[in-house]
Image: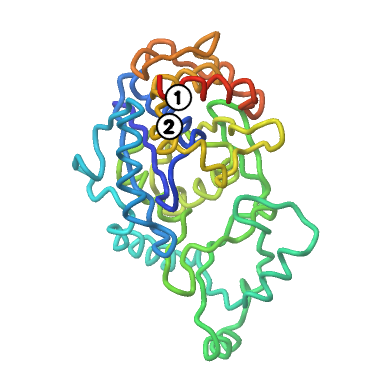
Amino acid sequence: MKRRGRFAPTPSGLLHIGNAFAALASWLQMRHYGGEFVLRIEDIDKPRSRPAFAEQCLKDLRWLGLDWDEGPDTGGSHAPYAQSKREAYYEEAIDKLIELNLLYPCYCSRSELASIASAPHGLSSEGAPYPGLCRSLSSEERERKAMKKAPALRFKMPRGEACFMDGITGKQCFSGEGLGDFVVKRADGMFSYQLAVTVDDAMMGITDVLRGSDLLDSTPRQLALYEALALNAPDFAHIPLIGDEDNPRLSKRDKSITLTSLHNAGIAPERIVGLLAYLAGWIDRPEPVKADELVASYHTDCLSSGNLVFTSELRAWLFDGASQ
């Protein structure tokens, strides 16, 4: 079976070089192994998503030298490629999970959830682990609470240890209790990232998910959904984030490192690709290079040792190429 990977940005802002690194790495993985690359727009969060950002994303990726076999502007056999047009599929998944008794209504207020978040505990990409306050409510209690508040729907995360083999960082284990029961549909009717991405990757035949390490603890949640829905799970690999000397993750507030701003500053896309290739260990010094020139040399050998540092020296090198 041909391998299939994807890049799935959220159009809530402009792509920056951290996003570009995830896109480039996933694209190179598929091109290196002769696979297919899919572009999907994850605009399920409609209040935060903007069509203009989605359009600019496509322009920025093509300017960087990336292409895709299926996507919102090229079509394909797994259309549509925007989550805002796929809600019927997510509703079907919700119905199946309800039939399996794997969901329960959660009536917790924002203040109750805020008090959970302020308590001492480990945090994850989903925030504080939900302690299951509404998991065992009686039918009478649910009826009484439903008169006051529309519920969210939470998935009953299996208890015990959840392990998987990451393609870059090796075996990863998480506690089901530490992850907590997570929302799959909000009280306002919005479907969650965890549910939508699982359904989409399965329906689109994605075999390889390569993404940032900030989503590492999303993987056991998604694997639990794959198992519950009897879907084939892809292989997961998580690349390090790009940070600077002061922060482990580049700030979205730094507008100077968006692809659009770099383009407008006259920096060639080959210079950005060369910077990312150097950070990833695909070339031994920063120098301009085209994306397709890296296909043969793609590997993940240097990506398991922690976050990558976009030093002031590298920033100077990048901006030295402006308007040349």
Mark 1: give few (<14), some (14-19) or many (20+) Cα within 10 Å. Answer: some
Indicate the position of residue 240 as horizontal and vertical percent values.
Answer: 59, 31
Looking at marks 2 and 1 on the same chain, the residue that comes earlier in the sequence is marked by 2
Q: Disc number at residue 163? A: none
- Seen in the picture, residue 220 relative to 195 is either above or below; the reply is above
The C terminus lies in quadrant:
top left
Q: Look at 50% across and 14% down and name the residue there.
A: 282
Q: Is residue 151 left or right of residue 169?
A: left
Which residue appears farthest toward the right when viewing the image?
120
In this rendering, position of residue 253 left or right of residue 46: right
> Mark 2 touching mark 1, by CB under 8 A?
yes
- Given residues 162 and 80, the one toward you in this image is 80
As drawn, 86 above or below 318: below
- Which is nearer the eye, 265 or 120? 265
Q: Residue at x 65, y 32 (%)?
A: 244
**91 lies above or below 267:** below
At mark 2, the secondary structure is loop
Circle 1 sits on which residue?
Answer: 322
Residue 31, image x, y percentages: 33, 21
The residue located at (67%, 36%) in the rendering is 248
Q: Is residue 42 above or below residue 277?
A: below
Residue 197: horizontal and vertical position, in percent?
A: 41, 49
User: What residue is drawn where x is 44% and y is 32%?
Assistant: 262
**Residue 265's mark?**
2
Q: Which one is in front, 215 or 160?
A: 215
